[in-house]
Amino acid sequence: MNTLIAALRGYCFKQRCRLLRKNIKIGSGLKLYCKLEVEGKGMISIGNNCTVSRINGDNRHYVTIYTHDPTAVVSIGDNAMLYAARISSKFEIRIGNDFLIEESGIMDTDFHTLSPDRSPPLETKEKCSIVIGNRVSIGARSVVCKGVSLGDDVVVWPGSVVKKTVPSGIEICGNPARAIR
Amino acid sequence: MNYLELTHKLIHILLTEPRLLFCYFKALLKGFGYIAYFRLFKPNIVIKFPFFVYYRLKISGPGKVFINRGCSVYANSFDGLVITTLSRHAQVIIGKGCDLGGMTIRCSNRISVGDFVMSANCLLQDSLFAVRRQPNLKRADQVEREKTSSSLSIGSRVWLTGQTILLAGTDIGDESVLGVGSLCFDRKIAKSHLAVGNPVVSSVSIERLEKMVSSG
């Protein structure tokens, strides 16, 4: 029953985006178990058979995808599972297929400089864009910072802060995140 | 906490701050409501009287949950107590007199918390992910670890400070303290030790720390 309602909500959201918001492209079979908040004028594309939900038993969080620039790009592959994820992009975030994220954030900008007036920083797309491979899973309460690229099959443990590029097939943990064993 | 202690506490509140007595009774009544609700509709959840609920409480899932008497749920960074059991054989056992503020528990095997534990916005999770993936997407060692997933146990009079995360294999001894923002997995912390770090690597004896502080 829940699945049916979620599929219906996903279908309605997709149709609404097709009519009103041309910058959002959504594949077939989206399931919306909770609110999906999309803001900004950047291009957002979500693949087929994605699930948007909150973690079972948690009723505070929902999924947000923000773009802070008209040229920003967020693209998520097929079969992604977004559980209480917070994605905010100024340049480019590319995520592969079979992605799992739980209650954590991905952001490709620092939003402010270190100077006291906290003005927007001078960042370039080449240095800051995030690339995430296929079959990556990210645990609860962790953050992926700007300029990081994660290879295929990477597992990010809960509570880690990822600041450096990680090759494929590695489990990382801690602040800053390092390989385990 | 027995009834004698309860009445002592009541008299103490009445003498020091009579305004708090109203909040106290409200929490007691709310807790009684929760106990009655779970006894009627969810037989897998057992909570002993008295139970004080000052903030939101949510317990869900098919597994067994047992909360001993005298526990209280406080607000801590907009979180109450959230307990989610992810499988049918999951077991959550919480000892008596615990102050559960902002604690989130996601249990798939077994989590036991001792008596008089203090907590602030911490996450106890005995599997890496709360969401189950299809087995063809997992790596072989990951599947193997899930089969041999160990339980998580916390001793008595432990203080779990803010933003801490405890994962499978953690075993914290009595009267120990876990520092702010630390993450602990596959590690045994001995009795009355302080452990800090993300991830926790080593722990220091509190007795030794106090000696160092007093000697300057």
Image (cartoon, coloured by chain):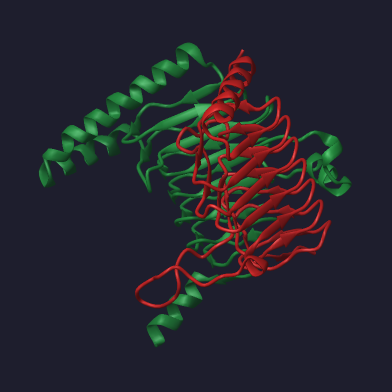
Above/below status of B166 relative to B97: below
Residue B53 locus on image (x, y percent)? 34, 33
Q: How many marks?
A: 0
Front residue (pair B55, B131): B131
Which residue is farthest right? B140
Residue B206 locus on image (x, y percent)? 49, 70
Q: Colour of chain A?
A: red
Residue B126 in view: no
Front residue (pair A90, B20): A90
Q: Residue at x 40, y 16 (%)?
A: B36
Above/below status of A27 relative to A40: above
Q: Which residue is drawn at 46% across and 16% down?
A: B39
Which residue is farthest bottom? B216
Q: Colour of chain B?
A: green
Front residue (pair A152, B26): A152
Residue A148 locus on image (x, y percent)? 68, 63
Image quadrant in which you'd find residue A11: top right
Q: In which quarter of the image is the N terminus of chain B?
A: top left
Residue B70 in view: yes
Lateral position of residue B200 relative to residue B53, left or right: right
Above/below status of B129 relative to B205: above
Lateral position of residue B163 relative to residue A7, left or right: left
Above/below status of B17 relative to B70: below
Residue B182 locus on image (x, y percent)? 55, 61
Lateral position of residue B160 relative to residue B106, left or right: left
Q: In which quarter of the image is the C terminus of chain B?
A: bottom left
